[in-house]
Image: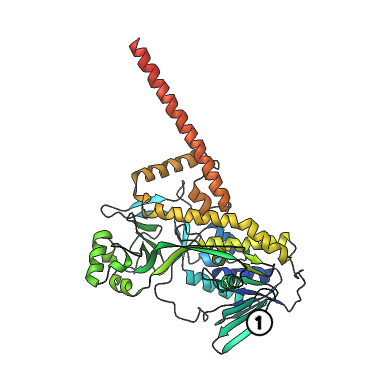
Amino acid sequence: MSTLPSSGMTERDEIAVVGAGLAGCLLACFLARRGYRVALYERRPDPRTGRVERGRSINLALSERGLDALRRIGLAEQVMADALPMRGRMIHPVDGEPQFQSYSAAGTLAINSISRGALNNALLDAAAALPEVRIAFDHRLVGLDPATGEMTFETPTGKTTAVAPVVLGADGAGSAVRGQLLGHGLLTESLDFLDYGYKELTIPPLGGDFALDPEALHIWPRGTSMMIALPNPDRSFTCTLFWPTHGTASFASLGSPAAIERHFATHYPDLPPLAPNLVDDYQHNPVGVLGTVRCTPWQVGGKVGLLGDAAHAIVPFYGQGANCAFEDVVELDRCLDDCADDWAAALPLFQQRRQDNAEAIARMALTNFVEMRDKVASPVFQLWRRVEHALERALPGRYVSQYELVSFSTTPYAEVRRRVRRQHRVLGAVAAGAVAALVGAVGAAVSRGRR
């Protein structure tokens, strides 16, 4: 690790990180560890002292990629103290009993339900405790000169300016840094929104305990829509509806309390007895948007860079948004090592190494939406998962499912897609050979019978 940056900076220069969310706080910690002074700017008030916006919690599914990043700054054990391991999916049909589907062949591997707010606060505390990090809340970026690194912020007391030798945008899908680069004509972007939105509901504790199995991610697949539920340390569950934004089965189609109650009694019959505030949550919690953000380049002149959702936001259906952003921070740290802290070389190298991986997980997340809302309830899909687990047990290390490679390893996302395609080609060839052998054996038996 570098103890004094070698890119012409002085000890008084500050790297600017815009966005004190998950990725920005983690990045500040990594940069401080390298010896940089960091100014961390956040448009919101300090979330550790303010009120949480209603219906915007969306729990995270923290898995190996995110944990790998947290281990590197000594935070994994603290964060995991409040995490709840989920070892599989619990599928809730309209009729019948819920069915459990393990994530791993051995049934021991788990993704971890954790509050986004709690994780953000832990990372904020870690960053604030470092003498190299200065945090400025209530600073909304409204201007950026990419050539000089001069930034203009709106604050409660008026506009203020600051200059940094390097400006890093870690400010989410609606990134102000990306917007500034776009305004200067320095990048192109595409925003692909789904015709779906999300809304949160709550299942409170029942008799002081969890109302559902806390060791599962619960899914109510309904073909063109679904609901999921993740456990919380206070023994409640945060439910998220993923429904179309238009049409007869959309959020807009349910207006009155009676219509809401009737819809859930028909399509999610096990929910109303567990959710006494169902109608109030549904009527007052906002509907969020879902989409994929792509842009290029991710950096300009080695002075301004983007990472995490600011560069490549994805839909949440693989539980990899935060994990992927954390992995970005680890990769940027590697690039700074490999480039001796020369930002003009490190930022283009970071994009070169990460862009294919970001696109791979974006595609897998979209595909997993179809799987979660529709396929998980299919007997064919369930049979295939049993076959996959049997193959993993029979061929340990040689056959690994896509889900395990994504969630329980740090194999690059693009390599996961390539490996899974190779595995499926081999399986297809083996299956074709088995069918051909069976047909040949049947044909030979018939021939002998005729003779």
Kind of element beneath mark 1: strand
Is residue 81 shown left or right of residue 442?
right
Image quadrant for the N terminus? bottom right
Q: Position of residue 305 (x, y in %)?
A: 63, 68
Q: Could one spot residue 237 in this view of the protein?
A: no
Q: Nearer the viewer, residue 178 or 266?
A: 178
Is residue 434 shown left or right of residue 131?
left
Q: Nearer the viewer, residue 151 or 211?
A: 151
User: In this view, which residue lies farthest toward the bottom?
Assistant: 157
Q: Position of residue 243 (x, y in %)?
A: 35, 62
Residue at left 40%, top 53%? 370
**Disc 1 crowd, CA 10 A, few/some/many (<14, 14-19, 20+):** few
Is residue 343 shown left or right of residue 110?
right
* 414 is higher (above) or lower (below) than 195: above
The answer to which quarter of the image holds residue 263 is bottom left
Amino acid bearing label 1: Ala
Q: Which residue is mark 1?
A: 162
The color scheme shown is: rainbow
Q: Position of residue 30 (x, y in %)?
A: 65, 68
Q: Nearer the viewer, residue 208 or 415?
A: 415
Q: How many marks?
A: 1
